[in-house]
Each structure stands twice: as C-alpha cells, then as structure tokens.
Image (cartoon, helix red, strand yellow):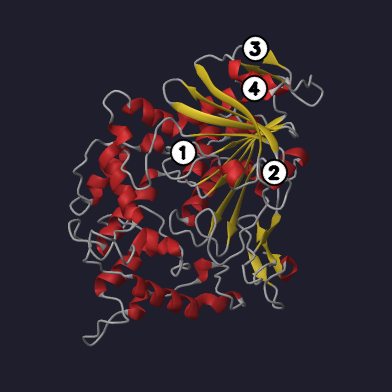
Amino acid sequence: MKRIGSRIVLAGVILAAGAGAAHAQIACASLKGLQLPDVTIASAVASTSAATRGGPAIAMCTVNGVIGREIKFSVQMPDGWNGKFAMGGQGNIAGTVSNMAAQQYNALGLGYASAGTDTGHDQGAPGTPPTWAMDPFLGPERQVNFMHAAIHRVTVTSKAIIVARFGRAPEKSYFAGCSNGGREGLMEVQRYPDDFDAALVSAPAYNISQLLLPRVVTGRMIFPDPKNFNKRNLDNQNRMALSKAVLDACDAQDGLKDGILSDPESCRFDPGVLACKGGKKDGCLSKAGVDAVRSWWGGVKDAKGVSLTPGFPRGGEGDALWQQNLTGADENPGKGSYAPNSGLLRAIDYLAYYLSQPDWDYSKATIPQLLADLKRLQSTNSDSPDLSAFRKHGGKLLMSHGWTDATISARGTIAYTESVYSHDATAKNDVRLFLVPGMGHCGGGPGPQRVDWLTALDKWVATGKAPEELETGFPEQANGQGGGARKLCAYPKKAVYAGAGEGRSPEQFVCK
C-alpha cells in the first residue's frame, strides 16, 4: 500500500479515501468469492456478537482466510462501521489468530473494522515449545512472518476486504498491541511506516537481549539445576515477605499509603535487609535469594560491571507476574514439587528452537555466549529510534507501560522513548509515553488500569493536539469495592499526590 495525495494504492488499484467516497455495503456472504493476490478466503459469515463493556450487541461480518502458505487472519467489520480500521497485535509468540485491538481496546465496540492474525504459524497448546521455528523447509519463512511480514501482509489484505465490503478505504488506520504486540507495532512504524496513521503500543518486547538475558541470568540463580527444579533459591514465601518489606519501606513515600508505588524509582529498598542470619533459614532470604533479587532489580552486567539490561523497578513483588517470571509455582504435578518460572522457560524456547539448539543448557551458558546467541536473533528487534518516515505523513505513536510489569521492564520503554527524543527532538510532538503506577503486564496489579487508549489516540490524530494528561480507572471488584480513577501524565512528568483524599480521583493529583 502507498499514498498518492488523499488516495490509496492497494493491490494495484487506486481507491478513494474519506467519508465522501462511495459507500456501498454489500452482503457479507458475497465476500466468500472475493479474489485477492495470494489470498484464500475461507469463510465470510454475518453474526451478532455478545455485548461488551456494557454496550449493545454488535452486528458484524467476519472474514477468515489465509495469506500465502500459512498466515491465517480474521477481519471483523461492524455493520455500523465508523469508517476506521484497527489492526490488533498478538501477545507471547502468537500462533493462534488473536486481536488485541478488539480484545483489550474495544475496537469493535467503538465501531472500528478490526483484524488479527496468527503471524503464520501454529503454536499449539500453551507451554508447547516453538518447534515450528525449526522446520527445515518452512522455519525461516515462519520466523520472518512472525518478526514482521505477517502483520504487514494482513494489514494490506484487511484494507482490501474493507474496501470490497464498504466501497471505500478506511479514513484512518491504527495499530494496537501489547507485549509482543507492542513489538509488532514498533516494527510496523519503523519498517512499514505507511501502513498506519497512528499506533498504540504498550509494554513492547522490542529488544531480544533485554527480554531474555534477565530471564536466563536471574532464572538460573533461582533454579540453578536444570535437571532438578526442587532446588529453588527464591520461593513464594520469600516473594511475599519481599513484597511486604518493599511496601513497608516505600509505599508512603508518595504521600499515600495505598499499596501502590506511584514513583517506584524513588524506592531504594535493598533485599539484604531480609538476609538469613545466625543459622536461621525460615522467613528470610538465602544469599542466593538476595543475589537473585538484586540481579532482577539491578539488571544484567558484564564482567566489568557494565550494564547490559535496565533491570526492573521495585514494586509488584506480591503479584502473580513475579511468580510467573521468577519464583515459579509451588506445585508441578508429576515433575517434582516446584515448577520453573515461565519466563525462564520462554527464554529456553527462544534460544533452543529459534537457533536450532534443542539441547541448549541455560546453566552453562556464559554471558558472552548468551550475547552472541542473542545477536543472531536481533532481526526480532524493533528498536530503531528513527521514526521520521512514519512521522512525515503525520504518524502518531502513543505508548504506555505498567510500572509493576515483571515481564518486560518499564525502564526499557523509557530508554526507547529517550532514544527517539535524542535522535530527533521534534519527535516529542508525535511520540508520547504514559507510565501506569501499580499496573502489571498489559493489565493486572493493584493500580488503576482502565484507559480508553484507542479513543485517546483517535482524538490526538483528529485534533493534532498531543495528550498531556489522561484518566485511568481502578477496576471494579465483585464485592462492590474499588472504582475511582487517577491521573496519568505524559513522560517525563509524574502524577504527584496533592495531599488530600483517598487517591481515587484525578483531581487529587497534579502533573509535575
């Protein structure tokens, strides 16, 4: 796809764009016979979705198909289309057709036509190793599809299907994704800058070394023996003791004792306070446990002490993400009493199967060896600070990250944002980052996390005025507790408690 003035060239045909173009909505079933280059339409079905977020049920047309050999996709088009398109990213390592724009950002409820993909491979059951990447014939193609090609191809195909149904191209096209989906969003604006008018990127896994090095280095401190996961140097009892100690030391620093660290970087708690002494073993951290926590917070360093990864902010130690990424589960039926953390297993998957080393041993790899292996995976990275081509046609990038994310560090997203600003100071006009206190990975945690991100992005595109402040709501609880909202401030500003109230109203915070 490319632009010619206000028109779009798609699949060799010049299409009109904008509300003034012809609008001829055709029957959904007729799209089953649509012919597009290298695309097979498997089904086109009219349906009515269940109500979402308290809104009405949505009448829509869903088109499913395959691009090339294996890139499966699904396009959903509401009958009450708002004239815009939202492409959804995929979390984890994809492998099933999914759509974050619809699932997390309510794209369909807002009237957007939306699409998702499996990025060209079948991952199988949760926890299944990515053997698809090792296939001697299809493996290289699948890896390229996963890294960048599938999102681009599905985006172009989805727009063609939208044109076929409505008789006009989308007025605006947005991308929305978190985690791997955030990586996909950055890859799109860097590699295919004309695909979207704006992108919504959260907690992006944009750098393979930052993603995997901490998982291996800290992971093997916790589980030093890959053949005996019963030996664990940091368990969930330790984790909860650590969580309490961090909150006791730092929760009130922001003026509001509420279980949320509004500014985690001001917390300087050291886990050595919990170190076992005098032969005591229960209710305290072993030396290996203290070292593991320091490694996680402080980041991976080389032999000379040079920082290789940014480390993770303090806070959220009591959340499930710490169990998933560090301590592991307390039960692993049939395989011993403990289960290794999923973060370490994911690192093993990448390094073993993407590099065709199924017997790779995390306990033996040195940091220089890890860096050499990860260098071979750098094509996965979407860390270029040069967004000039995307910004040239007015592209906007709205990013967010939860401060208590123990899957991908918020510090990494801050570093990427700073690199964009350093590359071109005017990028501050088109790139915004919002850090969310108390929120985990793509959601979760005790903090407020309900932001209408897609509407905020659309408003920015429509008005040209970059968001400086947003509101984020606390999730409602089944017992009727919760509710309320707080203020988010565009980085580098922070929401500072004004000193009165329970911290459940935006007016109780100021951006400084």
The relative height of residue 216 versus residue 322 in the rendered view (above or below) is above
- Who is closer to the viewer here, 14 or 464? 14
What residue appears at the point 40 percent right and 59 percent down from the top-left corner? 311
Precedes in sequence: disc 4 or disc 2: 4
- Disc 3 is placed on an element classified as strand
Tell me if 320 is positioned left or right of 158 in this view. left
Which residue occupies the foreground of this view, 186 or 100? 100
Residues under numbered marks 2 and 3 in contact, where contact means CB atoms less than 8 Å apart: no
Of labels 2 and 3, earlier in sequence is: 3
Between marks 2 and 3 in the image, the one whose residue lies nearer the viewer: 2
Pair 2/1: label in front: 2
Q: Secondary structure at mark 4?
A: helix
Q: Nearer the viewer, mark 4 or mark 1?
A: 4
Q: Dot 2 corresponds to which residue?
A: 109
Nearest to viewer (mark 1 / mark 3): 3
Task: Work out how far the residue at label 4 is from the one at label 1, CA to CA, in angstroms.
Answer: 38 Å
Amino acid type shown at disc 1? Ser
